[in-house]
Image (cartoon, rainbow, N blue to C red):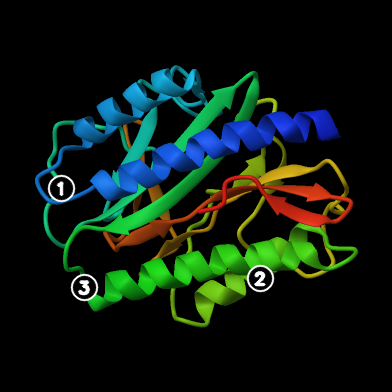
């Protein structure tokens, strides 16, 4: 069931989103060579506590997962697409790191992600990151047109990805968000124009293209993280966005 949000809910989501963005950007700045993934996890926990917020990820058990998630961050390196659990692995020059983060504040949930290059990265990695961010923007732009539907978002993302020779990762999607981390509807990163649910006032979505430099296929590991099947690089960008009477409002703008 799709849970539409009222104006008072958007006020709460704005506050949640503001906290999320401030922490996510601090983590992006902190992600440097020789910093460990656990260092980033600790920083996120400290900043959440300071903000009086909590994690949307910690102890969350998504559909298909074998066990609850044990961290506040998802930190996924290189060919690891999403749901990477922070460890003592240290970042090194040339890595690309996906940081996925969710915040709960006063009961309102926002979700966002970005990909950061560590030091000097390859041209392929730079191009993949740029295209993935452009794919996210294309999906958001598709939401602005009057009478837009869910399929318009996926069509825009897929076309932005493929024009530069990259693949949309199969089986990983965006979703509704706001009262819970994962709500209806599913937002596929591919689709057909004019198909799917009509976007209406009060709908809040997490739009999140996940692209691969190679195969669109992924493999789920024992720890519930996903890797590209062929070991190719992957990138991930995500924003929480609301449909309002005036158009769309990005609740996690960075």
Residue 55 appears at what percent x and percent y?
47, 23
Structural distance between the alpha carbons of marks 1 and 3: 15 Å
Q: CA distance from mark 3 to mark 2?
A: 26 Å
| Residue picked out by circle 3 | 122
Precedes in sequence: disc 2 or disc 1:
1
Q: Residue 53: horizontal and vertical position, in percent?
A: 50, 21
For the point 81% across and 29% down, which residue is it? 8
Earlier residue among tags 1 and 3: 1
In this view of the protein, which residue sits in the foreground, 162 or 120?
A: 120
In x, y percent, where is residue 179? 70, 26
Q: Compared with residue 101, is residue 190 higher up or lower down, i.e. above or below? A: below
Comes first in the chain, label 3 or label 2: 3
In the picture, the quarter occupied by the N terminus is: top right
Give the residue at mark 2: 156
Q: Is 96 above or below relative to 71?
A: below
Residue on which the image places disc 1? 91
Spatial CA span between label 2 and label 1: 33 Å
Question: In front of the other: label 2 or label 1?
Answer: 1
């Amino acid at each position: 069931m799709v849970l539409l949000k009222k104006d008072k809910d958007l006020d709460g989501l704005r506050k949640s989103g503001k906290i999320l963005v401030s922490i996510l950007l601090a983590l992006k700045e902190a992600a440097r060579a020789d910093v460990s993934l656990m260092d980033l996890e600790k920083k996120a926990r400290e900043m959440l506590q300071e903000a009086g917020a909590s994690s949307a990820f910690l102890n969350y058990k998504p559909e298909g997962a074998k066990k609850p998630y044990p961290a506040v961050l998802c930190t996924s390196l290189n060919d690891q697409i999403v749901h990477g659990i922070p460890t003592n692995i240290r970042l090194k020059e040339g890595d690309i790191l996906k940081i996925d983060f969710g915040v709960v504040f006063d009961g309102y949930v926002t979700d966002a992600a970005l990909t950061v290059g560590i030091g000097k990265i390859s041209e392929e990695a730079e191009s993949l990151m740029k295209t993935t961010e452009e794919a996210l923007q294309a999906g958001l732009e598709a939401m602005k047109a009057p009478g837009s539907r869910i399929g318009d978002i996926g069509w825009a993302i897929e076309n932005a990805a493929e024009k530069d020779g990259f693949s949309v990762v199969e089986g990983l999607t965006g979703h509704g968000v706001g009262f819970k981390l994962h709500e209806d509807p599913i937002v596929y990163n591919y689709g057909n124009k004019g198909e799917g649910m009509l976007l209406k006032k009060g709908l809040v979505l997490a739009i999140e293209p996940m692209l691969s430099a190679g195969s669109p296929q992924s493999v789920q590991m024992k720890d519930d993280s996903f890797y590209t099947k062929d070991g190719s690089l992957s990138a991930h960008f995500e924003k929480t966005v609301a449909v309002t009477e005036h158009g769309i409002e990005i609740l996690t703008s960075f």
